[in-house]
Amino acid sequence: MSRGSTAVIIGGGVIGASIAWALTKRGIACTVIDKGAFCAEASTASAGMLCPQAEMLDNVEHLRMFAKSQAMHRPWTEELEEISRISVHYIQEGTYRVVFTEEEERTARAALAHAPPSVEWISATEVLRDEPDISGDIRGAISFPEDGQLHPVYLAKALKAALSRVGCKLVEWTPALGLLMDHGRVSGARTVARALAWYGDKAATPVLLEEITRHLGGDVLPVRDSNIRHTQASPDQGAMPDLAYLLHTLAMVKDERAIPVLRAIVDKIDSTLERFHDNRSGIFHYVDSVCEIAEGIGSAACIPALERLHRMPLFHGHVCTLMVQPDFFEERLAYLEITIARALARCGCRHGLNVLVHYLSDRRHTLVRYAHHELVDITGQTIGEDEATWRTYVQAMREVPVRPWQTPRGAS
Ligand SMILES: Cc1cc2nc3c(=O)[nH]c(=O)nc-3n(C[C@H](O)[C@H](O)[C@H](O)COP(=O)(O)OP(=O)(O)OC[C@H]3O[C@@H](n4cnc5c(N)ncnc54)[C@H](O)[C@@H]3O)c2cc1C
């Protein structure tokens, strides 16, 4: 790779980040993309132990390579610490690889011939003197005094800061959907579909549909599996299944080719309260994204699937006319019911308008304002919030106009 070229690294764990660091130092511009947050997977789950040789004694080539990488590690982290000004909390206390059987002892002693001079065999008595809690039933150990440990969370922070400081671009929450090939060589990654979708470009649709179809393979909708911390009870959190992110992206394209996907999602929604309470299931986000797809398209072809959704008991009949504040989940379900109604109405369905009108009698004023805002936007009428007046108006409408969602997503 020549200087001045650009490398795209898929995966911002410690491996991808280290490659980016090495390339950037050689003058190669790098972009690291990650489907989630930077270094949020194995690289921060790690215990941070740096004891490669102790883990594999029976392969001479590996032993040599591990010894070499071990020697390089501390200077590498020191450089990172200097550039990032973040300590990785490195400690060097060594490792004992404890040996229990005669055969293990043979392998361990043979490995010594290929290890650096500091690595040595020590007797069971010496091991137990240093580590009295170890079982007495040992033959001895190999001591690796150069081994150490660092704090993986701080290594991730240091890598991130150092990479930013040297101008490496980090792009989070952007999965690579596939590789672009050019004459048998990888020439790029298919993340561009999201960017195209953002601008409403229908060129994104086939790529998104292909990826969505892959996620839709099973009998049930996939749950959230990304490692996003600090989530609360569903649905009040930003974390959703990867498929729901893709559906929201598809919604931005406003393309009728998305309608079969919309139907397939509705078919697979498990609309039990138990499932809704499960903060990994993403039911809230699946319903929300399906509605967003439908109202962006604004087609009568979306109505049967939306009506089916609304007939599910979980998403039906949440208007509250009592003076009691219902629980958190009830309020969220009411919000979803309005969202379904809004999508129906925007596709030209009178039933959707009627549900919105019904919500004008709700005691929760934020929901009344939400339903009223949609009624005004869809019909163009600036009637107040009186339910009876709106009911009369909707009944008198000769036909319900199709009114697709117009405002580009992301616009405030
Ligand atoms: C519990 C645990 C303890 C461990 N303890 C130690 C230890 O003490 N010492 C040690 O040396 N090793 C340890 N390891 C192993 C070490 O953590 C891993 O070998 C190392 O973190 C791997 O780094 P990585 O960058 O390859 O993977 P990851 O950190 O998993 O990074 C891969 C990245 O790729 C991203 N990605 C995946 N698919 C896509 C896509 N399609 N598009 C864009 N991005 C994508 C992911 O979101 C992720 O961020 C431990 C591992 C675990 C799980």
Image (spheres, rainbow, N blue to C red):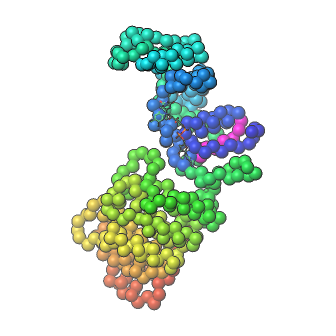
Q: Name which residue lies at 36% across and 51% down.
A: 232
Where residue 282 appears, as percent x and y from the top left, is 41, 58
> Residue extending furthest front?
103
Left or right of residue 17: residue 380:
left
Residue 335 versus residue 369: which sits nearer the camera? Answer: 335
Q: Is residue 366 visible?
A: no
The prevailing secondary structure element of the residues shown in magenta is strand
Tally of numbered discs: 0
Where residue 44 appears, as percent x and y from the top left, is 48, 37
Where residue 100 appears, as percent x and y from the top left, is 42, 19
Residue 278 versus residue 328: which sits nearer the camera? Answer: 278
Q: Is residue 49 visible?
A: yes
Q: In this picture, is 183 found above or below 19? A: below
Q: Is residue 350 magenta?
A: no
Q: Is residue 32 magenta?
A: yes
> Residue extending furthest left?
323
Left or right of residue 336: residue 18:
right
Quarter of image, res 64: top right
Which residues make up the magenta segment? 27-33
Q: Name which residue lies at 42% across and 45% down.
A: 229
Left or right of residue 167: residue 410:
left
Q: Name which residue lies at 43% across and 55% down.
A: 223
Quarter of image, res 317: bottom left
Quarter of image, res 167: top right
Where residue 117 appears, as percent x and y from the top left, is 57, 11
Image quadrant for the N terminus? top right
Q: Name which residue lies at 49% across and 75% down.
A: 302
Q: In this picture, is 165 found above or below 267? A: above
